Image (tube, grey):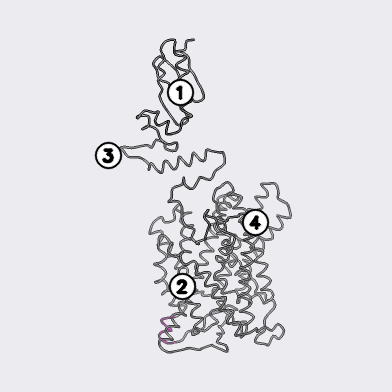
Amino acid sequence: MSVKEAKFTIGSINSSPEDGSLVDVDIGSQNSLINTGSQGGGSVPILNRQLRSISDYGRQSPRSRDNSLSEGDRKRRKPLHHSSIPTYSSDGGNLHHAVDAQDSATLNRVRYYQRLQPDPVIVPDHVLPPHIFSVFPTGVVTDAQGKQHSIITIFSIWNTMMGTSLLSMPWAIQQAGFVMGVVLLIVMAGLTLYTCYRVVKSVESAGKNGVLVEFSDVCKAYLGRWGEIVSVFFSLSALIGAMIVYWVLMSNFLYSTVTFCYDRIVGDDPTANITESSVVCVYTSNNTSLPPPSGSTTFDEVWDQTKTVPLFLCLLIFPLINFKSPTFFTKFNALGTLSVFFLLSYVCKMAAGWKINLNFTDTESPHYAEVFSWNFPALTGILALGYFIHNCVSSIIRNQKRPENNGRDLTIAYLLVALTYLFVGVMFYASFPLNKDCIADNLLDNLPHSDPLSFAARFFLLFQMITLFPLLVYITRVQLMDQLFGKAYPSVKHVLALNTCLVTISVLFAIFLPKIGTIIRFSGAFCGLAYIFTLPCLVYLLDQKRNGKLTPIKIVLHGFVILLGLVNFIAQFLLL
């Protein structure tokens, strides 16, 4: 066999040398044409020299390689992640790219990184296009590496859980009895802490390969499509319940704020139902507090807390919730922490003036306090929402600098929340100077509208809720629209229709059922049944089964937790 007829294969180098022919050399993504220049019997030495030249080419620097190539070859060379982009001809005969060149390059670059190893890898940040990055809405402070310290994680969880349940805590303790209320506050904190920890661990396990997941994705992985639908549905239910409570409270605070200003302008200072130490005994019906009856003046007819104010509130809120992005409202997140500290200080001031008013023995005493009451499910329902953070805890701890401390930080955060609820609930309940049945499901309703500090508290909370309500609507819209249409803002018509439905539901509750205690306990028990008690336990049991670690004791204990959630939900109907 002559040299001219030989075919050489060296790695990815294929050559069929002929006299004066070209050797096609493929090195990685580099393609070049090299003239063998072989003449007669000198083909072998020439070919050897060409192969040495190829080897030298591979050892050259990129700049040297460019210099060694012809001008035409350099024009054809592209980076590895750039592929040929298909084109099409328009009616005018012009050629157009089917996709953007940069988008195509980014996609191929990501594919390249994914091929580096069998398992998914984390694509470096500098490779990703900048438009996919967004600011975390809670404004968590991170270090230079984008990680947050434990103290930030703890107070982010604490601030997120602190909400409207805080205003109902004294009423909830009155419903359960003093001692029973304190015990349930601690027990429910431990129970919800455990299930929240199970959520955190399941998300960590599912995202250990660098894939960012939420608990709904974990539910889909273990329970199928219906698991994801159930998790998203109950998460939306919690958001809608919070919106209803917000609308009732905003109507309450707006009514009180305008009434205070009106009384100051006209010089009228109403003192109906105000007793010693400037405390209002709210009229009660079936152990559920109601707002005090309004007067019969023209102002009272036009400005009624349950009949007209919820409708007037639409004029203020509806334009705000139609913004495409709620970025502006995230700037007021710090108000949540300030309002909690202001409320704590206000309760301390009132309790210092009222002193301790508790009597556990004399049933005829106006300060008699029950140790135990069969209405305690009202407290467990409220606490199910008060300790609810399961649907967003993974987003808060995702940037944790030391993920191994997640369990510790979560425990500290829950401890702070429980102490805050205990402080407000016990302090207000123990010092309340009137009959304990007079405690309202919104503790500010027990304070007169004419009190300047009470006015300041209501106005401060009103402004905070006005800025938070659009965020709740936005989160609801993103979750719902993404499930239905695959995008957060499908069209203006879709958004207007959704916002109209949400506002209508909120207004109807504010008019016909303005009892935040009842709304919170039903919402908490309903959402908690799935997201607190059932889904975390089911996912954990299925994970243990996959790993061959499932034992009967685990089945019994977690089955009991699920049963507690079901009993808690059913018990809410027994208090009607």
List x then y, in percent, for residue 129.
44, 48
Q: Indicate which label's residue lies in the foreground, 4 or 1.
A: 1
Please tell me in which quadrant of the rendered image residue 89 appears: top left
Foreground tag (3 vs 1) = 1
Quadrant of the image for the C terminus?
Answer: bottom right
Q: Secondary structure at mark 1?
A: helix
Question: What whole-number distance in Å separates the C-alpha atoms at marks 4 and 2?
Answer: 38 Å
Residue identified by numbered label 4: 537
Q: Mark 1 and mark 3 in contact (Cβ < 8 Å)?
A: no
Q: Is residue 275 above or below residue 58?
A: below
Q: Residues within 10 Å of mark 2 (few under 14, many from 20)?
A: some
Write down the residue under mark 3.
91
Is disc 1 surrounded by few (<14), some (14 to 19) or many (20+) residues within 10 Å? Answer: few
Helix, strand or loop at mark 2: helix
Q: Nearer the viewer, residue 254 or 421?
A: 421
> 389 or 384: nearer the eye?
389
Q: Which residue is mark 2?
A: 463
With respect to residue 362, does 460 lie above or below?
A: above
Q: Which residues are magenta?
A: 296-303
User: Upstream in the sequence, badge 4 or badge 3?
Assistant: 3
